Image (cartoon, helix red, strand yellow):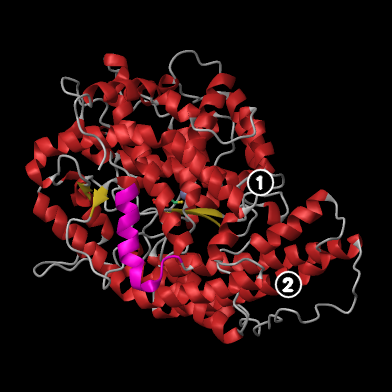
Amino acid sequence: MYKLPCNVLICLSMALTLSVACPPAAPPLEVRRKGEPVSASSKPSVEEARAFIEQTEAELKKLWSRHERIKFVQLTYVTHDTETLAAEAEAQTMTFLGEKAREARRFEGLPLPEDLARKVRLLKLAQTLPAPPTADERAELAEIATFLESTYAKGKYCPPKGACLTLDAISRELATVRDYDRLAELWQGWHAIARPMRARYARYVELSNRGARELGYPDLGALWRANYDMSPEEFAAEVERLYAQVQPLYQAMHCYVRKRLRERYGARVPEAGPIPAHLLGNMWAQEWGNIYPLVAPPGQGRGVDLKALLQRKKVNPQQMVRYGEGFFTSLGMMALPETFWMRSMFVRPRDREVLCHASAWDITFSGDVRLKMCIEIDDENFQTVHHELGHIYYYLYYKDQPVLFQAGAHDGFHEAIGDTVALSITPRYLQQIGLLEAVPPSQDGDVGLLLRRALDAVAFLPFGKLIDQWRWDVFSGKIGPQDYNRAWWELRTRYQGIAPPTPRTEEDFDPGAKMHIPGNVPYIRYFLARILQYQFHRALCETAGHRGPLHTCSIHGNQAAGERLKKLLSMGTSRPWPEALEVITGTRQMDATAMLEYYRPLKEWLDKQNQGQKCGW
Ligand code: X8Z
Ligand code: ZN
């Protein structure tokens, strides 16, 4: 029963296998240009549509599997050769999907059964990187996409003296060091990795927009926004509606945190302006939990220090994942397959470049699931392990769906599962699993515990929204390449109320210092997940018969809650997401009231603390 982390031998042999034993890449498929005839038969039948989709799904499963396998090798072993293989695979997949989406146009307007009509639509939306019209452009786009991601993966800050620092090493310092200038140096050092991406990013925008237009969308942002069972415009309005619900909570927290940071850093934190972005314990100021000791409610203890508990127990990276697995199995879910333990990467290898940003993989769409993560032993990683296992369990429970339905109800659902489970990591749960000896008595309505959680979850909300706000505007042309960085900081200040610690120019490309921008991963999903996870939590806690404040609920060990969750997971994206939401919550609308209810005692406390303060920026 055992489990080596993916080591150099395994990955090396995988890389060799790929380059030696895999069939050579198929010759590039030409994508037809707009307006060209698509088929000999002008009026296709429903049977033809079904046969087309079945055939396409069979080919797609093979192609995607090959793509995922190559990407997994590339990102656990970044070299010139694996980058080349990855770019080839990207171009091939893009080309195939582009061609199939075009062929599928002949079935539009045909009265198809619901499942088939849905698959035809999903086929078109299945690409976050759509194929531009010519083979040269597709190869160029794939090469740029691979370059951007690899550049991020290999990024380091090399100070004038001493060894170069990886993002993990920098992040450890950002979390604990409280020296303003040292933090600014690290912040600036990391952001410099993105400068070489800038020009190529502009070209990537041009080419991927051309791909989106081939599919009938005005730009790539509109294509991304079309994947929510409503029009892109309706979706953008949904996001605004949800943001308006939570904005007052963020503003209250910002006001309180700024006041406490002034106590620490003095006038370098302005009384009524934006907070310097490097003081919040995280490279992107997206989650602020690491500065809890600086802002903890006066007079309250430090609460439960999970990092200390894990380290005292000498928990190792695999055991971190075992704790996560234990939670899911307590809900009545299956154990993780043996191959998961054998083929995952759990630690940063010492001898090669990898992309450490945590991710969950579904290599074959039939159970070969893996984690790729550089696990450190602390509370943030404990949380992330649960997040990733949410993806893994989604993969495992929808694996019998047709491949086009193997996805989250929408991508925010996929991101929300593990985070929902993580809300059940209460002190009582930590005691049940033997990590904590005794649950500390509740003080002041648990304001300390709620603040610790809100520093991560609530701080994330404006960040989760603005990343794609920026990208949507970049793709639509509202933000041109000459304004990339200025517009980025305008949004960062407008939404998050933060400012860069050092002067920025258009030589910089600060968006590129965040993985999802060079990695081409849409981001609004995380904003949606942050809201949905509380909705799911509230509903599952009701199912589990919980009484009392929402933050004291843990669904650990509750089979009824597990059944609900399993039902949701096994649906994949076979039905429009409001139906999936109904399965788990009984309602069909995304709604932030569960989150507001969860943090209500904190909001009341913050409002008191903020009395007499000039809030806002
Ligand atoms: O990227 C992730 C996961 C993988 S899907 C680790 N997250 C976002 C981020 O790190 O920026 C989870 C929270 C937000
Ligand atoms: Zn995720």
Q: In this view, does 162 lie above or below 405?
A: below
| Magenta span of residues | 478-494
Task: Classify mark 2: helix, strand or loop.
Answer: helix
Q: Name the residue under label 1.
A: 572
Q: Nearer the viewer, residue 453 or 397?
A: 453
For marks 2 and 1, give the one nearer the viewer: 2
Looking at the picture, which amino acid does disc 1 mark? Gly
Q: Residue 219: horizontal and vertical position, in percent?
A: 56, 67
Q: In which quarter of the image is residue 597?
A: top left
Q: Which of 564 and 468 is in front in this view?
A: 468
Callout 2–callout 1 Cβ contact below 8 Å: no
Q: Is mark 1 within 8 Å of ligand 2?
A: no
Name which residue lies at 56% across and 86% down.
136
Q: Residue 277: horizontal and vertical position, in percent?
A: 23, 50
Q: Which secondary structure is most common in the magenta stretch? A: helix
Give the mark count. Answer: 2
Q: Mark 2 points at which residue?
A: 102
Name which residue lies at 53% across and 79% down.
19
Q: Nearer the viewer, residue 143 or 66?
A: 143
Does residue 467 show up magenta in the picture?
no
